[in-house]
Image (cartoon, rainbow, N blue to C red):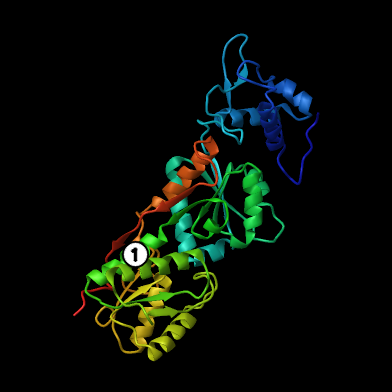
């Protein structure tokens, strides 16, 4: 049976998949050797070099093992933990694809997603894993699983592709490990690594209360999202547990996702108008660094200083040196933890050590900056 190229897929990848299908069907095993590359090449209608590359990659990934010596050959690796996706427990992750809703220039313009990508890039370099930024957008007709496999990627990592959830679910169903960085994925059954937003909001609010601020306001986005809901829930719970007031202390601004088209000046203008109508108390918890910096700008326009008049804290580690702002007091996860946990989860799914969908919540702690102080 000759293999046929499909939509530009390299022939060696097609041969590789044909071999994986035969292994899954137990045509080859630890006892029954895979035919030599020349025999495979003739059988599948490809060049010997193509068959050789497919075999080499399966050996490198730990699926096959070569036994040297007279009468030996290439066999399916023995072991108790072969994964459902056809990999093996000791198959090493060699290349991962990263998908984002925008191109590279837009990715760089988004502080949150760009720095997440840099964390992943550093961790890939540390582990010796290749990294590919895949050129796809929701609804453009490109299949993310196909893109990943054409690029030689064994798994798919998602920075932001909320509108492409059906395609991501299809990729996961197609035996391709899919891991999402961030909170949106918790609304759909995909594996994820995300900050513990509820715990972070709780920690920030508790910190402001412990500084002696009896009334702690919150600035949240109007957009309905799990991250916004969790952060507001943590804020409200901390106030309720402390017996503190929260009536009239919620400010809302912005409808789009920060860093993806939201105009910073519009956010600041919205907050300025609300602060004029309802002057903020001496402490404010902002949904994220973007909101915190906008709030500080609005306070300055009102002639109020931070932290002299109003302490401001937030969640996130992405804005410490952004927009000429002071270093923010914020709930943060450990530096490098997101990239480390994303790669570890991908490896665990690929090797069959974890079953999708699996989730990891990163613990957060308050790191004090220049924007909070004890209440008078």
Asked whether residue 329 appears in the rendered view, the answer is: no
Is 287 drawn above or below residue 41 in the view shown?
below
Quadrant placement of the C terminus: bottom left
Side of 308 where 69 appears, left or right: right
Is 284 drawn above or below residue 203 in the view shown?
below
Q: Position of residue 220 (x, y in %)?
A: 44, 74
Q: Which class describes the residues within 10 Å of circle 1: few (<14), some (14-19), or many (20+)?
A: many
| Number of marks | 1
Q: Residue at x 55, y 42 (%)?
A: 95
Q: Residue at x 42, y 47 (%)?
A: 340
Q: Residue at x 38, y 87 (%)?
A: 275
Asked whether residue 243 appears in the rendered view, the answer is: yes
Q: On the image, which quarter does residue 315 sit in?
A: bottom left
Q: Position of residue 99 (x, y in %)?
A: 58, 55
Q: Position of residue 129 (x, y in %)?
A: 50, 42
Q: Nearer the viewer, residue 130 or 138?
A: 138
Quadrant placement of the N terminus: top right
Side of 275 where 128 appears, left or right: right
Q: Which residue lies under the disc numbered 1?
A: 202
Is 130 drawn above or below residue 51 in the view shown?
below
Q: Nearer the viewer, residue 174 or 49?
A: 174
């Amino acid at each position: 049976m000759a293999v046929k190229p499909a939509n530009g897929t390299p022939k060696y990848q097609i041969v590789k998949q044909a071999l994986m299908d035969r292994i899954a069907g137990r045509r080859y095993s630890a006892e029954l050797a895979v035919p030599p590359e020349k025999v495979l090449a003739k059988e599948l209608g490809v060049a010997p070099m193509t068959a050789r590359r497919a075999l080499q990659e399966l050996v490198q990934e730990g699926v096959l093992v070569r036994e040297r010596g007279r009468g030996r050959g290439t066999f399916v690796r023995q072991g108790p933990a072969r994964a459902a996706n056809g990999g093996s427990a000791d198959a090493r992750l060699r290349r991962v694809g990263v998908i984002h809703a925008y191109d590279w220039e837009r990715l760089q313009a988004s502080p949150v997603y760009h720095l997440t990508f840099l964390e992943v890039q550093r961790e890939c370099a540390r582990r010796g894993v290749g990294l590919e930024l895949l050129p796809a957008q929701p609804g453009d007709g490109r299949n993310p699983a196909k893109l990943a496999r054409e690029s030689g990627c064994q798994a798919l990592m998602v920075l932001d592709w909320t509108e492409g959830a059906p395609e991501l679910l299809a990729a996961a169903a197609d035996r391709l490990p899919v891991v999402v960085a961030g909170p949106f994925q918790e609304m759909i059954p995909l594996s994820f690594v995300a900050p513990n937003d509820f715990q972070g909001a709780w920690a920030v609010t508790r910190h402001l209360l412990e500084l002696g601020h009896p009334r702690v306001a919150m600035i949240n986005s109007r957009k309905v999202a799990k991250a916004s809901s969790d952060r507001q829930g943590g804020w409200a719970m901390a106030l309720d547990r402390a017996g503190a007031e929260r009536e009239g202390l919620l400010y809302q601004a912005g409808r789009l996702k920060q860093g993806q088209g939201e105009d910073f000046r519009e956010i600041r203008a919205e907050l300025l108008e609300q602060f004029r109508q309802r002057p903020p108390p001496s402490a404010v918890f902002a949904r994220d660094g973007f909101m915190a910096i906008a709030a500080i700008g609005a306070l300055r326009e009102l002639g109020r200083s931070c932290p002299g008049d109003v302490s401001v804290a937030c969640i996130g580690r992405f804005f410490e040196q952004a927009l000429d702002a002071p270093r923010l007091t914020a709930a943060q996860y450990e530096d490098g933890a997101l990239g480390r946990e994303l790669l570890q989860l991908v490896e665990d799914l690929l090797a069959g050590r974890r079953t999708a969908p699996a989730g990891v919540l990163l613990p957060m702690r308050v790191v004090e900056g220049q924007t909070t102080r004890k209440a008078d």
